[in-house]
Amino acid sequence: MTPDFYFTPFEDRRPPPPVPWSLAVERIWHVLAISNLVAGAIYIWWRWRYSLNYDALWFAVPLVIAETCAYFGLILFTANLWKTRDYPRRPPPGSIAQCTREGEAGERPISVDLFITTYNEDEELVRLSIRDAKKVSYPHPIDFRVHVLDDGRRQTMRQVCDEEGVHYISRTNNIGYKAGNLRNAMEQTSGDFIVICDADTRPFPTILEHTLGYFRDPEVAVVQTPQWFYDLPEGKRLKDVWGRRAGAPGRYLGAVIEAVFGEIRLGEDPFVNEPTMFYDVIQRRRNPWNAAFCCGAGSIHRREAVMFVALRAYADAIAKSGEEGRGRIQKLLGLRHQEDDALARWQAAQEEELTPYKFHVSEDIYSTIVLHQDGERKWKTVLHPEVESKMLSPQDLLSWTVQRYKYAGGSLDIFFHDNPVTGPGMTLAQRIMYLTTFWSYLGAVWNLVFLLSPVIYMFAAIAPVGTYTGDFFAHALPFLVLNELAFMMGTWGVSGYKGKVSYLASFPISLRALWAVVRRKRIAFPVTPKQRQEGNYLMLVWPQIAIIALTVTGFAWCAFRLFTVGGGYTLGGLIANGLWGLNNILAMSIMVRAAFWKPDREEDG
Amino acid sequence: MSFRENLRRGRSHLIIAVIMIVAGVIIVNIEDSTLQREAGKPIPDHAFSAANPGN
């Protein structure tokens, strides 16, 4: 009997279709985006040239630098969102010969290995994934095998695999964590393609039928499908919540607000896990530039490409270790360059291991970077726009924080220590797309400046601009308003507000990751828990609480001084910085609320 | 997806834009009035007409 998981009631949920594409909307977006960038350039130029408060350069200069960095990020993000051009879909191939270059393979059915990686997840949870994997269908004869990769070495997991009739793979250590687990499985399998699933990834029957067609292009290495969390809390309608709290007047007021602004749900997606913006907008719009990157679960890989990455990394490691080893050999044997070279390389080859997936916290994006850097083979990656599997979202702030820290730390580690933007091999467009990703994580630095700026004004009566006169707003307002309108059209059909404020509010995670990477501290990659972890998470959001407290106190202090002694404040300054602070408080409050969030089942209990 | 539904999803952009425009107009008028009071000079040309609806 299937146990009663918290997500059991959501089993019948279906994923949303991909965001429809419209040429008219794209054209409007282009016009607004260019206008926005022009208005932004005028604003930034004016800020540097005319608006600095020379009496407080210690404050004015960092803020204008922060604004300039954010504007550069805006240019990158605009480039990322520029256009949607899906990779052409083709019918599922009937034989491997249709997926390779001429003469590279004979006529035989395609073979596919589906890997379910697990470490300590509930065996019954994994059983659900196994059962869904077994239902995967294909219109042609196919050699399809399901493997459970258990890094927990559990007898109970093996038993579940035996009961379900799938292959159980384990190893004697946990070297390389998930990447090492995958490597171990690759050594024991031989399918032409590999489907990667986490313990909670439940593939749909259509996953192969809808994605293997892309591999008819022999250069396609990876197809990533959007991740869809089917367990996201739906929240409750505003009118219902207010109706319960305040009776008929509350319900009526809630209904009026919803009539004006549309449906409003409270408690919906408390951790802002909704991935549409990332997959359907950001990743999908990298397809035209061959710059979508692999995100692990729900991706399909050509084994040849995975091995290519492994061999490239192996060769690089040998070259590097060979150089280091040469010195030792020269010392030992007294050999000269020509003679010691082969010996050093041979020695290095003995020491290095072949690693199909890089042993790195962000092995997915890292492996994609290696593929994109290969100028000879010109591997392609594809973001398939339709959801082909369902999975579980982090259910508590600790799990969410661990996951985001891994993303931020992994990306920043690559940026600082093996930067593909300046490295060889990629096209200009690919470099811009990767820089967009890295820049977004660096954004925590200037976001901190934006969070503290209104506080500084409210406590110290120091404005970063000369005055809040028409001149300031004549430059700032067109840019700010156009920015909102442009991104409303650029992400038409996708709700982006929570994602935007969550990005602002997650600044402590990115800063912590940045600090660790700068100090060359290794980013650990523990498994993100798949089930809710109990605990008090206030300690995770103390920076956000501090920002809220500082802003509220600062506003009260500023208002008190303004209306009593003046204190160098102006009413315009109070309103401008008060609204800015309010925006920051609303953003921070999302994170603080998430720390207190409990699922309905716990609240009811 | 209907136009109305798409607009609902993008409403935060419109709300923020409206708030910024309204706040900008109010702040400019307040600041210009303050400057005028302090300096004893007339409201600058760039002040929004809302300050002097009769002009």
Image: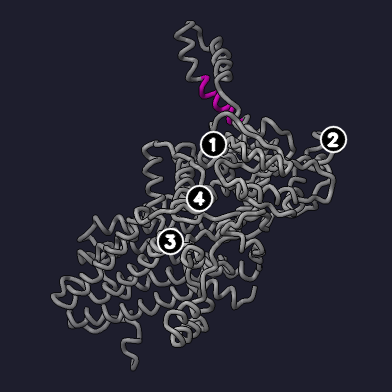
**Amino acid of disc 2:** Gly
Mark 1 vs mark 3: which is more N-terminal?
A: 1
* Dot 2: chain letter: A
Give the residue number, with chain letter if any, for mark 1. A177
* Residue sitting at the far top: A333
A323 sits left or right of A189 in the view: left
The alpha-carbon separation of the residues under discs 1 and 4 comes to 24 Å
Give the residue number, with chain letter if any, for mark 3. A594
Give the residue number, with chain letter if any, for mark 2. A106
The alpha-carbon separation of the residues under discs 2 and 4 comes to 40 Å
Q: How crowded is mark 3: few (under 14 residues within 10 Å), some or many (20 or more)?
A: many
Mark 2 vs mark 4: which is more N-terminal?
A: 2
- Residue B41 — which label? none
Give the residue number, with chain letter if any, for mark 4. A437
Q: Position of residue A182 (x, y in %)?
A: 62, 36
A47 sits left or right of A173 in the view: left
Q: Does the magenta stretch include residue A320?
A: yes
* Dot 4: chain letter: A
Q: Where is residue A359 in the image (x, y as percent from the top left)?
A: 54, 35
Mark 2 vs mark 1: which is more N-terminal?
A: 2
Q: Is mark 3 on a helix, strand or loop?
A: helix
Name the residue rendered at 50%, 56% in the picture: A395
Q: What element carries label 4?
A: helix
- The answer to whether tags 3 and 2 share a subunit is yes
A18 sits left or right of A488 in the view: right
Q: Provide the residue span drawn in magenta.
A: A312-322
Mark 1 vs mark 4: which is more N-terminal?
A: 1
**Amino acid of disc 4:** Thr
The alpha-carbon separation of the residues under discs 2 and 1 comes to 35 Å
Name the residue rendered at 17%, 70% in the picture: A568
The alpha-carbon separation of the residues under discs 3 and 4 comes to 25 Å
Relative height, residue A324 to residue A305 (above, below):
above
